[in-house]
Image: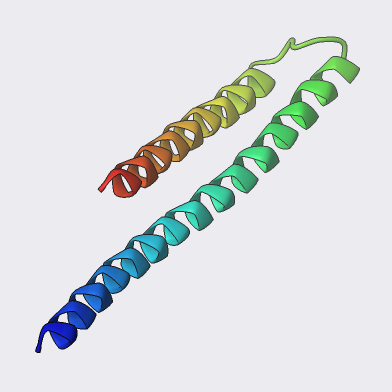
Amino acid sequence: MFKRSKIENEMGKLARQSGILFETGKLKLQITQLENDLYNLKAELGDIVYKAFQNQALRGEDEGREIEAVCIKITELDISINNLRQEVDRINQT
C-alpha cells in the first residue's frame, strides 16, 4: 500500500510538471510567432521610411499615416510579447 501511494503521488507530480511544460511551450511558441510578426513590421516600416527618403524626405501625410499605423502595430505587439513573457514567468513560479 505504501509503495502504491508513493508511486501515485510521484505520477501526479510528473503530470503537473508535464502540464506546466506544455503550457509554457505553447506560450513560448506564441511569443516566437509575435516576434516574427514584429520583425516583419519593422522591415515594413524601414521600407516606408526609405521610400519616403528616396522621395526627398517625409513630406506627405500619406507616409506619416503609414508610419504611424505600423508604429502602433509594433507597440501593440511589444505589449503582447511582454504579457506572454510575464505569463510564462508566472507559470514557472508555481
Q: Residue at x 68, y 32 (%)?
A: 42
Q: Write down the quadrant of residue 86 in the picture.
A: top left
Q: Residue at x 16, y 87 (%)?
A: 4
Quarter of the image for the N terminus: give it.
Answer: bottom left
Q: Residue at x 57, y 52 (%)?
A: 33
Q: Write down the quadrant of residue 89 in the picture.
A: top left
Name the residue at the front extreme. Answer: 2
| Closer to the camera in the image, 53 or 26 | 26
Q: Write down the quadrant of residue 46 in the picture.
A: top right
| Closer to the camera in the image, 71 or 63 | 71
Q: Relative to residue 72, is residue 94 depicted above or below? A: below
Position of 11 compared to 26: left or right? left
Q: Position of residue 93 (x, y in %)?
A: 30, 43
Q: Position of residue 10 (x, y in %)?
A: 25, 74
| Closer to the camera in the image, 74 or 2 | 2
Q: Position of residue 70 (x, y in %)?
A: 59, 31
Q: Relative to residue 24, is residue 4 depicted above or below? A: below
| Closer to the camera in the image, 57 or 14 | 14
Q: Relative to residue 91, is residue 47 depicted above or below? A: above
Position of 4 compared to 47: left or right? left
Q: Position of residue 5 (x, y in %)?
A: 13, 82
Count of marks, rendered view = 0
